[in-house]
Image: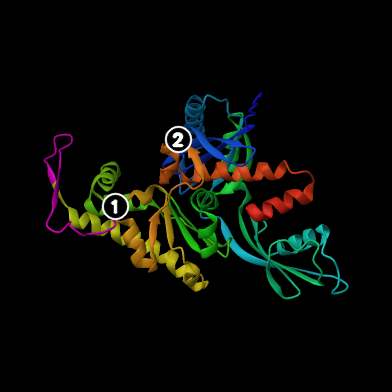
């Protein structure tokens, strides 16, 4: 008997993060069944970005080129297009509400009705210079029946939709796009960094139970609230690991480069075990050796990290989401590597906190286990979901698939 084996077709998807501290490109291989394997990584220190936004296009382009070349060699592929993450203090989010009213209560909801209520939900007051980055569907309500995921074919006269919208300044969103396109690469889509990170780390159970994802970057800190399986809230603070380094530089009266090294080697988000300990720093340029009080160093770090987490806690508390986070807090980004950060997060949020790991992604362990690569890995997952939806025949099939997977239109 002849046994024929036909391997699944695969698609290569690349996620690119132009961050404040690093540029990261992750190459993923996606099968027809939706499986994602990381097959290549390229990284380069970032010099042309501040607080998550490009401030020097030439330097940023050079760093992106280096990361892409490394990723191509690592994966043995030629990269032609990327899914690109964006962040920055100019991004704003809000929840909107759309309504469609039919002529009678026994009206059968059709795709045009859904399209109309989607359009209505996207109508809100925003600055003229802003553009919508994401319009993320939460739940439909039909004649008072809530939590409907797909109303097409149901009977009802009043269809409502709750939606989460992320928007930002158009020109500032286009700056990283221009950098990438200047390297003869196409940008498939722009994706909010916090959304990408949450896609990398969370499973469906966590999204359903309610979870807060906090991504500590060098220049920004993004956070995303999931509950009842959908995104309820997103936020950005223009504060990150670089601010901790600057605090140490001023507080300890030393160069930022040396302060950053101390942060990485001896820093922590707790002062436990630091009392009475000192660090002896080797001399530079003929200056005498100096000693640094370890407890003082860590108190400076704790103050900034605690303040950042408190701001997030206040925001989600004011919006009434705190009690919906039964799955706790998931941490990622470079700041998630700081010793004791999980314990500090637990104290601030009064919830269990864990270090995030890529979920349902195979391949290189260096990518799936690295909290600093969560955004780039999430971009690959985002691209896999989007491209799978685009392969569906017809617009209705595409919208239905994305409704179940992302809720993004």
Residue 282 point in image, percent of width and height: 15, 39
Q: Is residue 40 magenta?
A: no
The residue that mark 1 highlights is: 339
240 shown above or below 40:
below
Q: Is residue 289 magenta?
A: yes
CA gap between label 1 and label 2 equals: 24 Å
* 282 sits left or right of 341 in the view: left
Which SS class for mark 1?
loop
Q: Which residue is mark 2?
A: 364
Q: Quadrant of residue 168?
A: bottom right
In the rendered image, residue 216, in percent from the top left (x then y), is placed at: 41, 52
From the viewer's perspective, tell me whether residue 167 is left or right of residue 349. right
Quick check: 136 above or below 280? below
| Residue 175 in the image, given as x and y percentages of width and height | 58, 42
Element at label 2? loop
Look at the image and tell me whether residue 222 can be seen.
Answer: yes
At horizontal 48% and vertical 66% (from top left) the residue drawn is 325
Residue numbers of the magenta segment: 268-290
Q: Sequence order check: which comes first, mark 1 or mark 2?
A: 1
355 displayed left or right of 72: left
Residue at 11 percent of width and 57 percent of height: 276
At label 2, counting other C-alpha atoms closer than 10 Å, the crowd grade (few under 14, some 14-19, many 20 or more) is some
Who is closer to the viewer here, 352 or 99?
352
> What residue appears at the point 88 percent right and 72 percent down from the top-left corner?
103
| Of the pair 331 and 282, the residue shown nearer to us | 331
18 or 148: which is nearer to us? Answer: 148
């Amino acid at each position: 008997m002849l046994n024929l084996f036909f391997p699944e077709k695969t698609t290569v998807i690349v996620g690119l993060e132009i961050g404040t501290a690093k540029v990261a490109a992750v190459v993923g291989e996606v099968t027809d069944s939706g499986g994602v394997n990381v097959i290549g990584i390229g990284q380069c220190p970032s010099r042309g970005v501040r607080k998550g936004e490009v401030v020097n296009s030439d330097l940023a382009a050079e760093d992106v080129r280096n990361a892409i070349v490394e990723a191509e060699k690592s994966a043995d592929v030629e990269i032609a297009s990327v899914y690109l993450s964006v962040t920055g203090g100019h991004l704003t989010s809000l929840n909107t509400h759309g309504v469609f009213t039919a002529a009678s209560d026994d009206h059968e909801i059709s795709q045009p009705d859904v399209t109309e209520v989607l359009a209505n939900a996207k109508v809100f007051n925003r600055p003229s210079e802003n553009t919508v980055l994401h319009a993320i569907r939460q739940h439909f309500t039909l004649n008072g029946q809530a939590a409907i995921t797909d109303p097409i074919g149901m009977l009802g006269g009043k269809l409502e939709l709750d939606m989460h919208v992320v928007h930002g300044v158009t020109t500032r969103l286009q700056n990283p796009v221009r950098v990438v396109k200047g390297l003869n690469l196409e940008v498939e889509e722009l994706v909010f960094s916090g959304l990408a990170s949450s896609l990398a780390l969370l499973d469906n159970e966590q999204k359903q139970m309610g979870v807060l994802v906090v991504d500590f970057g060098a220049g920004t800190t993004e956070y995303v609230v999931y509950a009842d399986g959908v995104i309820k809230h997103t936020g950005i603070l223009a504060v990150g690991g670089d601010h901790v380094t600057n605090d140490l530089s001023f507080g300890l009266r030393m160069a930022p480069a040396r302060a950053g090294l101390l942060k990485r080697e001896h820093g922590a988000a707790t002062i436990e075990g630091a009392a009475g300990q000192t660090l002896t720093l080797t001399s530079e340029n003929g200056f005498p050796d100096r000693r640094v009080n370890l407890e003082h160093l860590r108190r400076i770090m704790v103050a900034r990290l605690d303040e950042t987490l408190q701001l997030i806690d206040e925001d989600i508390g004011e919006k009434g989401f705190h009690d919906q986070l039964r799955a706790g807090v998931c941490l990622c980004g470079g700041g998630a590597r700081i010793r004791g950060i999980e314990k500090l997060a637990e104290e601030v949020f009064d919830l269990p906190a864990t270090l995030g790991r890529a979920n349902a992604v195979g391949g290189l362990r260096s990518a799936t286990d690295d909290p600093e690569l969560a955004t780039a890995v999430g971009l690959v997952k985002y691209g896999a979901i989007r491209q799978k939806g685009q392969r569906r025949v017809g617009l209705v099939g595409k919208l239905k698939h994305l409704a179940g997977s992302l809720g993004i239109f």
